[in-house]
Image (cartoon, rainbow, N blue to C red):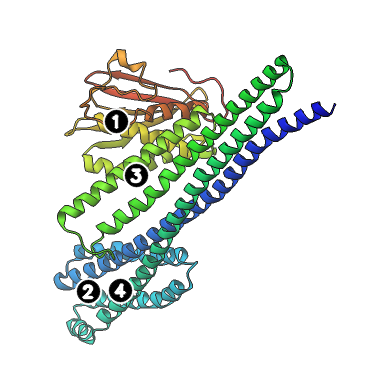
Amino acid sequence: MFKVNSYTSWIIIGTLLPIIAFSIVAGISFISLNNMIRDENWVTHTYMVIDKADYFMKTMVDAETGQRGYLITGQENFLAPYNSAIPLIDNQIAELRQLTSDNHVEQASMDKLEPLVKKRLALLDINVNLRRNNNTSGLVQNFDAGTGKQTMEEIRQIVDSMKNEEQQLLTKRILDTQSSVQTAGYVIIFGTLIAVILTIITTLVINKKLAERQKLERSNIELQVQSQELRDADIAKEEFTTMISHELKTPLVTISGYAEMLKEHDSILGPLNGEQIKAVEKISIETAKLERLIGDIMDAQKIDLERMKFNKKEFEVKEFLDEQIEIHSKLMNEKKIRFINTTKDTAVISSDQHRLSQVFANLIKNSVDFVPQNNGSIEINAQRKNGHVVFYVKDNGSGIPKEKQDSLFKKFYQVDTSLKRSHGGTGLGLVICKGIVEALGGKVWLESEVGKGTTIFFTMPRNGVNGNHAEK
């Protein structure tokens, strides 16, 4: 009886030690990852405050420019920048106050800024009215006083001080992020190493103890140990892959942030010449590509493991597609592509709006790569059919040959497999689209003809419940 209990104890110890070790590594890594995410969010918040401050100053300058043009010419059309800027300023002030609510120094700056802005806007309004009434002497008197210029300079100084405060916070937060990345790396490497060593040691001890038993019993126990080791290895590999993917994204945020800082004319890191700016822009572009690649790999893994999470809520499909037009309008304007939403249906659907936006982003990018350069056209649409909503993205690109259409939704598949193919990509975009659509209860397919373009359709159940899909 004693021997049986001894063997059982050793088996329990040998099984628990690796699990405990990996659990500790996972727990500490989880804390480290949370710290990285927190630091990353603060870095993003700092960039947002700086952008909002820059945008506010641009709006104030627009208001002054419009007023100045009107004072000089007396023509109402010169007031367009002024009229556009005035309604935006109050909201921008409110946004800046909200974004800096965690910083008492910047809140004090906001307390000084608001009355100065009101004062400056009032002076602008007085000058515009004096010009409308042809009161030249009043205008001359106002300009001689120099109040408007002095007020604007005080506004600019306050905004600059807020931006300097944010730049200092940005430097600190970037250092915090780097520290969190380093800590997470040490935890994963050394923690995993210790866990593996413990696994090896306990396995050797178990094997030694089991060798004392009869041959048949020893064989059975060895098989059980090997099976457990394989399961532990699969768990460790999955956790390690997920952690590494997250860690790869975190330094990319730092790289991207520094690249954006370097591109700024008044960067605290100093001005750059033309060639240096081009190099920094190349870094930004390649960093964004790498971020998308990591995101695609992580999403593909989540789909394979059926671990992708969804948050369903009701929204109107026409408004949703209008948002897609707005999101991708800059890219379309740069590429000179005609991009339209022809949706008339105002149907309401219950689904994951964020994931559907991801589907559209992949489908639209795919179309952008293949439409002609001079007269490219992309159309998006949605309409109800048999309890579902049928979405599509249609382009006038080069089209896809029939023999290649069946393989389009396979991992890493490229229509053009030559070494010098003109379009990049991982071949995961459409796979991710298919995985998301099917996980949400839908179905995806395409219609394409060489030389005439491609249309990719997918359905979504309106009530958000998986069921029979609409027919094509």
* Quadrant position of the N terminus in the picture: top right
Judging by the rendered image, the residue that carries numbered circle 4 is: 156
Q: Do the residues labelled 3 and 2 touch (CB within 8 Å)?
A: no
The relative height of residue 57 versus residue 222 in the rendered view (above or below) is below
The relative height of residue 39 versus residue 313 in the rendered view (above or below) is below
Lower sequence index among marks 1 and 2: 2
- Dot 1 amino acid type: Ser
Q: What element carries label 1?
A: helix
Judging by the rendered image, the residue that carries numbered circle 2 is: 132
| Label 2 Cα crowd, 10 Å radius (few <14 / some 14-19 / many 20+) | some
> Label for residue 326?
3
Judging by the rendered image, the residue that carries numbered circle 1 is: 367
Lower sequence index among marks 3 and 2: 2
Q: How far apart are marks 1 and 2 (CA)?
A: 52 Å
Lower sequence index among marks 2 and 4: 2
Q: What element carries label 4?
A: helix
